[in-house]
Amino acid sequence: MNFERPRVMGVLNVTPDSFSDGGEFITEQSALDHARLLEMAGADIIDVGGESTRPGAERVDPSVEQARVIPVIRAIKRELDVTISIDTMNASTARAAVEAGAEIINDVSGGLADPAMFGVVAATGATLVISHWRGFSHIMDTQNVYHDIAVDVSRELSQRVEAARAEGVARDKIVIDPGLGFAKDMKQNWQLVARLDELEKLGLPILVGASRKRFIAGAIDPEEPTQVSNERRDVATAVLTALLLQRKLWGLRVHNVLNTTDTIRVVAALREGEQS
């Protein structure tokens, strides 16, 4: 079987409060410098976000969000040869980002946070990432009751896909994301990762964003997951990436792009060795 390399989506949070890198790239120059490093490391896509979605995060006004992300998107578009994604739940920010040069709208709410989102996607022709989501950050940890998590997530994603299609979004412009960390406890995240075959049944490209998340840290140190460093989380993320590459994934959303591209190369070399 030929190995199909997934796209690598590098995370660029221009926020003061994101869970692993808040405050590191809040100026236009620091954000552009980091985007350049992500591209050099092998990122195909840079996902720019101006609102934290970590558990308990406060919402920000779209005007604040846009003031953070639009200058950065313009700078990346001007300086780098890379696809730009906007990580937003706000339709107005999505539209402004596409006008500034973004080609992908990554909505972690799957269109639930802003009913105008799908209309913007249809009008702009952007690629849409629909994630599984059940509520904003301040309540999402209370929304994790499932009968069968893989089946339930697949069904709810299918419903959001149909809602997008009804608003005019082309099916070939839709990517789905299991929404790891959103309304799922540590055990449920692992159960979902282990059963991505349920999502594959929808016949749509899949983006996985496990990088540095709580359930990764919880596997390393169940007693004190918050004490697990980003470096250790990155190694664990790379291990999980290697295992997930047994599946056909559209993309991987990660903080450490170099670890990820190295992992992809090693898996590709192993596949080549098996075939020779």
Image (cartoon, rainbow, N blue to C red):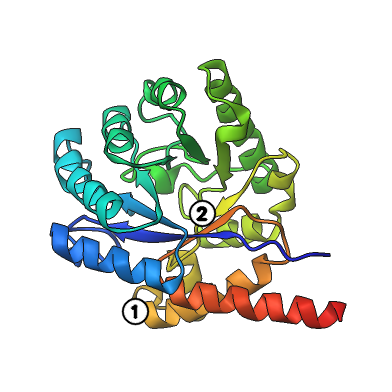
Asked whether the viewer can see residue 221, the reply is no
CA distance for labels 1 and 2: 20 Å
Three-letter code for the amino acid on which mark 2 is drawn: Leu
Relative to residue 70, is residue 229 drawn left or right? right
Name the image quarter holding residue 40.
bottom left
Residue 78 to residue 163: above or below: below
Residue at the disc numbered 2: 180
Give coordinates of residue 264: x percent, y percent: 60, 73
Q: Which residue is painted at 21% across and 55% down in the image?
A: 15
Asked whether the viewer can see residue 82, the reply is yes
Q: Nearer the viewer, mark 1 or mark 2?
A: 2
Give coordinates of residue 32: x percent, y percent: 23, 61
Rendered-image quadrant of the C terminus: bottom right
The local secondary structure at tag 1 comes to: helix
Looking at the image, tell me whether mark 1 or mark 2 is earlier in sequence order: 2
Residue 105 to residue 262: above or below: above
Residue 75 vs residue 226, the one in the foreground: 75
Q: Which residue is painted at 22% across and 55% down in the image?
A: 14
Residue 60 to residue 113: above or below: below
Rendered-image quadrant of the N terminus: bottom right
Three-letter code for the amino acid on which mark 1 is drawn: Gln
Few, some or many residues within 10 Å of mark 1 (<14, 14–19, 20+): few
Residue at the disc numbered 1: 227
Residue 186 to residue 146: above or below: below
Give coordinates of residue 250: x percent, y percent: 61, 52
Give coordinates of residue 202: x percent, y percent: 71, 38
What is the tally of numbered marks visible in this picture? 2
